[in-house]
Structures are given as structure tokens and as C-alpha cells.
Image: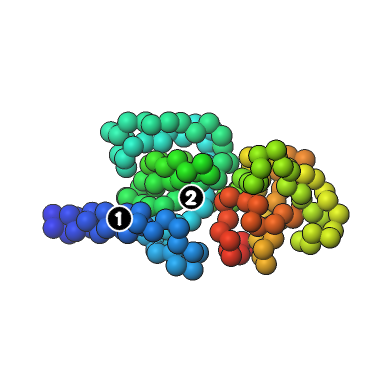
Amino acid sequence: MGFVRKFSSLAAVCTVWIASCAPGLAAKEMVVAASGLPVPRYVSLKSDHVNVRAGPTKDQDVTWIYTRSGLPVEITAEFENWRRVRDSEGAEGWVYHSLLSGKRTAVVTMKKKDDLAPIYDNPDSSSAVAAKLQAGVVATVRRCNDGWCRVTGNGFDGWIEQQRLWGVYADEKVN
């Protein structure tokens, strides 16, 4: 019995190591982790107080705290009930799984921080502009297809070019 337990822990460590070596895999190249879900994948923070730790145990130091519920993060590895996450700024650490949600959100990104991202009435850049969003705005992702995502948030609902979002993969379809 002890051997089985040690072997399953070793398998989990190997899964963590494999996922950490290839964080930029395309959506179709994801590996299935111990949870049965693909890695890497995007999720969001469930709470407005999420401790990020240096390693996958409660004994590890808290390296920082996220204070924004709904913020998207990318799971890059799993170990038991712990998930290694990366945020839109590239910071990584370990979070307990119950502090994460499958709700899809994304952060608006722009080449120049002062530029605004147009939100269109339809998934077509010739349709009417419904809103313009600053870089860093967090939106709920309703669906993505053919390079466009329908997003909603406080005071906006419309379509944005998928490349303007951090929180969905380039060719990912979200339903």
C-alpha cells in the first residue's frame, strides 16, 4: 500500500514537471492532469482573497495575495489539490484548488497601455462600436469562435477580437 501511495505521488510530481516544461502549449496539445482536466487551462479566482504560495502545501510561505475576484489565471501544473497558476503579468505560484472557479474571464490587453479596445455590436470590425475598454479591464467571456469573443462586464456587452484578450487561447472555442 505504501508503494502505491508513493507511486501515485511520483506520478503527480511527473505530471507537474511535464506541464511546467511546456507552459506555452497550444490548446490542442494540452495534457490531462490528475484532476482529469487539461493543463494548461484558464480559470478565474473565486474569491477576493487568494493566497499564492511558494509551493503546493499550506506549510509553504504566502508569497502574495490576489485581492480581485474573477481575475483570470492560467493553471500550468497540478499537484494533488494544488494548482500552479500564472497571471497576465507572468507571476506564478501555487493556489489551493477550491479558491479557483471554472468561470471564464479575460483581461483586455493592448500594445500601448493608453490605447482603447473596441467592443463591437457584432463579431465584425465594420459593425457599430458598443464600447471602448482600457487595458486591464476584466470581462466575463461568454463565448469565442473564429477569432472573436463575446464579453460582458460592468456597462458593456459585445464582441472583441480574441487577440485582445489574455485568458483565452488564440484558437480556442468557448461555448
Q: In terms of depth relative to the viewer, which is nearer, 135 or 65?
A: 135
Judge from the rendering whether residue 24 lies leftward or rightward of residue 170; answer left or right: left
Q: What residue is at 76 percent from the left and 50 percent from the top?
A: 119
Whether 72 is drawn above or below 170: the answer is above
Residue 175, numbered label = none
Q: Secondary structure at mark 1?
A: helix
Image position, residue 49 (x, y; %):
49, 31
Q: What residue is at 42 percent from the left and 42 percent from the top?
A: 92
Image position, residue 173 (x, y; %):
61, 64
Q: In terms of depth relative to the viewer, which is nearer, 21 or 55?
A: 21
Whether 10 is drawn above or below 101: the answer is below
Whether 121 is drawn above or below 55: the answer is below
Image position, residue 138 (x, y; %):
64, 42
Q: What residue is at 45 percent from the left and 40 percent from the top?
A: 91
Q: Dividing the image into 4 quarters, which one contains the C terminus?
A: bottom right
- Label 1 is placed on what type of residue? Trp
Judge from the rendering whether residue 13 lies leftward or rightward of residue 76; answer left or right: left
Q: What residue is at 28 percent from the left and 33 percent from the top?
A: 59
Whether 48 is drawn above or below 42: the answer is above
Q: Which residue is mark 2?
A: 74
Q: Is residue 143 visible?
A: no
Q: Which residue is mark 1?
A: 17
Q: Furthest-left residue in view? A: 2
Judge from the rendering whether residue 143 lies leftward or rightward of residue 5; answer left or right: right
Q: Secondary structure at mark 2?
A: strand
Q: CA distance from mark 2 to mark 1?
A: 16 Å
